[in-house]
């Protein structure tokens, strides 16, 4: 019985694998606030993300509460010039291969 189960399970996993990769694409709207501060004697600018949602109605953006997202925000002088507490919006996109892109959409809007 076990060999039969293995014979059925392996083709099922192979058939489900493309579906899992196709569903891993993300197109999200990240919203946050600008934070300026001092760290090791240097002025630093960071963004605290407080909201993640679909970029538009057709976009996929599934994030589990325990899932960690890591990405580097692009350098932009608008962030350095924005006062602390300014609202910012980013578009975050990733594909099934792990490639991602983050674009600054707006600052202070």
Image (cartoon, rainbow, N blue to C red):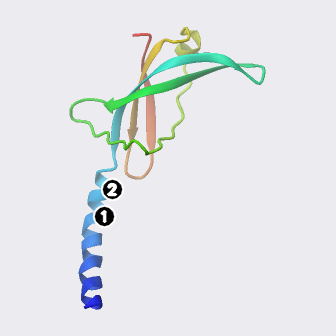
Q: State the residue at coordinates (32%, 31%).
A: 53
Please tell me whether residue 86 is drawn above or below residue 93 in the rendered image: above
Q: Secondary structure at mark 1?
A: helix
Identify which residue, 57 or 6, lies in the foreground: 6
Question: Which percent across, then down, holds residue 85?
Answer: 51, 12
Residue receiving disc 1: 17
- Report the number of discs: 2
Quadrant assignment, res 18: bottom left
Question: Which percent across, then down, holds residue 105?
Answer: 40, 21
Q: Which mark is residue 70?
A: none
Quadrant assignment, res 66: top left
Quarter of the rendering occupied by the C terminus: top left
Quarter of the rendering occupied by the N terminus: bottom left
Q: Verify CB contact (< 8 Å) between mark 1 and mark 2.
A: yes
In the shown orientation, is residue 44 left or right of residue 12?
right
Please tell me whether residue 52 is drawn above or below residue 33 in the rendered image: below
Question: Which percent across, then down, holds residue 106?
Answer: 41, 16
The CA distance from mark 1 to mark 2 is 6 Å
Identify which residue, 100 or 55, lies in the foreground: 55
Identify which residue, 104 or 61, lies in the foreground: 61
Question: Which percent across, then down, holds residue 22?
Answer: 29, 53
Q: Secondary structure at mark 2?
A: helix
Direction front: furthest residue: 65
Q: State the residue at coordinates (54%, 34%).
A: 72
In the shown orientation, is residue 36 left or right of residue 109?
right
Q: State the residue at coordinates (26%, 84%).
A: 5
Direction right: furthest residue: 41
In the shown orientation, is residue 36 left or right of residue 33?
right
Q: State the residue at coordinates (29%, 90%).
A: 3
Residue receiving disc 2: 21
Judge the density around disc 2: few (<14), some (14-19), many (≥20) Cα neighbours within 10 Å: few
């Amino acid at each position: 019985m076990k060999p039969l189960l293995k014979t059925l399970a392996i083709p099922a996993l192979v058939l489900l694998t493309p579906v899992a990769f196709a569903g891993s694409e993300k197109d999200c709207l990240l919203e946050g606030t600008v934070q300026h501060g001092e760290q090791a004697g240097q002025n630093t600018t960071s963004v605290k993300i407080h909201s993640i949602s679909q970029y538009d109605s057709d976009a996929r953006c599934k994030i589990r509460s325990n899932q960690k997202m890591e990405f580097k925000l692009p350098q932009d002088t608008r962030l350095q010039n924005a006062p602390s507490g300014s609202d910012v919006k980013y578009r975050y996109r990733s594909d099934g291969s792990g490639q991602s892109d983050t674009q600054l959409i707006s600052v202070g809007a």
